[in-house]
Image (cartoon, helix red, strand yellow):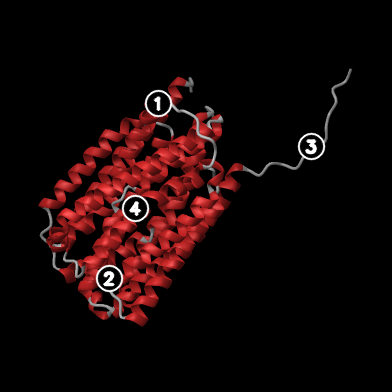
Amino acid sequence: MSEVKYPAGPPAPHKHAVFFRQSGWLMIANVGSGALFVLIHLLSKKISVAEYGAFGVMLAVVMCVPNMPLQMVFAQQAARALATGRERALAGMIRLAWLGTLGLALLLTAATLLWHTQIMTAWKLPTAAGLWITLVVVLLSFWLPMFLGLMQGQQNFFWLGWVNIYNAVARILVAGILVFFFAGASTSMIFGVCAGLAAAMGIGVWQTRGLWALRAEPFNVRELLAQIVPLMIGFAAVQFLFTADTMFVKVYFTADESGFYVSAGTLSRALLWLVLPLATVMFPKIVHSSAKSEKSNLLGLVMLGTAGLAAGAAVGLTVLGPYVVRFAFTAAYVPVATTLLPWYAWAMVPLSLANALVNNLLARSQFRIVPVLLVLAVGYGVALTRFHDNLIMVLKTLGCFNLLLLAACAWFTWRGALKTKIEDGE
């Protein structure tokens, strides 16, 4: 009896085409939302340099919330749960994490109540209101990454992009109204950040209701901790390298110098908007492939795209720096920010490449890199307390540690790839 042949259906879209379509949309969303995020810094023209420096340090505190680790933990857990059919156990983990982060935020609030005078003096904050609003922003910054991670793990990249856009729109709209029509300053600007996070949070909660609203089932706590603790430590160390310099600068330099530094950092970190979507799309796909013991060759594409986009953006900021600073800020920022911009922009290039490699390693649960990441983060913090004679020295320190980070990630990636080839008999 001859074999019955059925007509072939439409061809499945090529995985690489899907990857580039998804990452392309996130790039568009990131660039669009990033441009809107930059608009809030244009409000610096309406306030003093010292007030802008105060806003910069409040924003840096928020950036030190481990939002990257939280998002990546939930992205990894959501991708694994969907690949292995354990969605109800994931629902229990979501609820536990929500309550846990609420408790942590309450502890931070209590500590701030005890030491708010010392904090305001060290960070040169003009009013206490900005500090209390920052606490609310910190709480939302704990919660939002959880839901962004769930969307990332679901590979719901369409709404992941729109969340960023709505966050940026609400931020600039509220802050702009308060500054232009009510003579607001740094406190009004951080309130705008709070409004944007609240808007994004609402969308994230709605889009992930199919996961967190499920009836929860028990989960293996020890197995869960074995996965999430290395992820948290690893991504927290990378985030510390992203953000710590601004807070150290605020402590060791004057209010005006801090404002100039924040302006250069804002423009330099903008190049990350171009490259981070590649790693964002790659991460859940590699987690999914790893959970099902499937091979994936996305890393090469991500590294190539990251290198090209990051280097091109750094060249652009180096060449066009004076014009960009003059457009985004007042003339007072131009001399210092223009000098800092090339150093800052090129320091972001190895950090961008290292971030892609870290995403690949941790998505595959290759956690041997984590102690090295922790040592680098601690070493970086110690170095910033020693090498801060001027702002350029701070950026040289940042660049050196980013290169060390890239070298360590490349070594563990190459070592892991070689081991895999040996095990496969290649």
4 or 2: tag closer to the N-terminus: 4
Please state which of the two labelled residues, at mark 3 or mark 2, is closer to the viewer.
Answer: 2
Quarter of the image holding residue 45? bottom left
Q: Secondary structure at mark 4?
A: helix
Foreground residue, 131 or 70?
131
Q: Residue at x 37, y 25 (%)?
A: 222
The x and y percentages for residue 405 are: 28, 43
The disc, 3 or 2, on the residue closer to the chain's N-terminal end is 3
| Residue 199's disc number | none
Q: Nearer the viewer, mark 1 or mark 3?
A: 1
Q: Give the SS element for disc 3.
A: loop
Q: Earlier in the sequence, mark 1 or mark 3?
A: 3
Distance of mark 1 from mark 2, alpha carbons? 44 Å
Along the line of sight, which residue is nearer the eye, 66 or 272? 66
Residue type indicated by callout 1: Glu
Residue 398 place in picture, x, y as percent: 23, 52
Residue at 83% in and 29% down: 5
Which residue is tagged 3?
8
Q: Are marks 1 and 3 in contact (CB under 8 Å)?
A: no
Q: Residue at x 55, y 48 (%)?
A: 156
Categorize mark 2 by other alpha carbons within 10 Å: few (<14), some (14-19), many (20+).
many
Specify which label sits upstream in the sequence, 4 or 3. Answer: 3
For the residues carrying marks 4 and 2, which lies nearer the camera in this image? 4
Where does label 4 land, which residue? 139
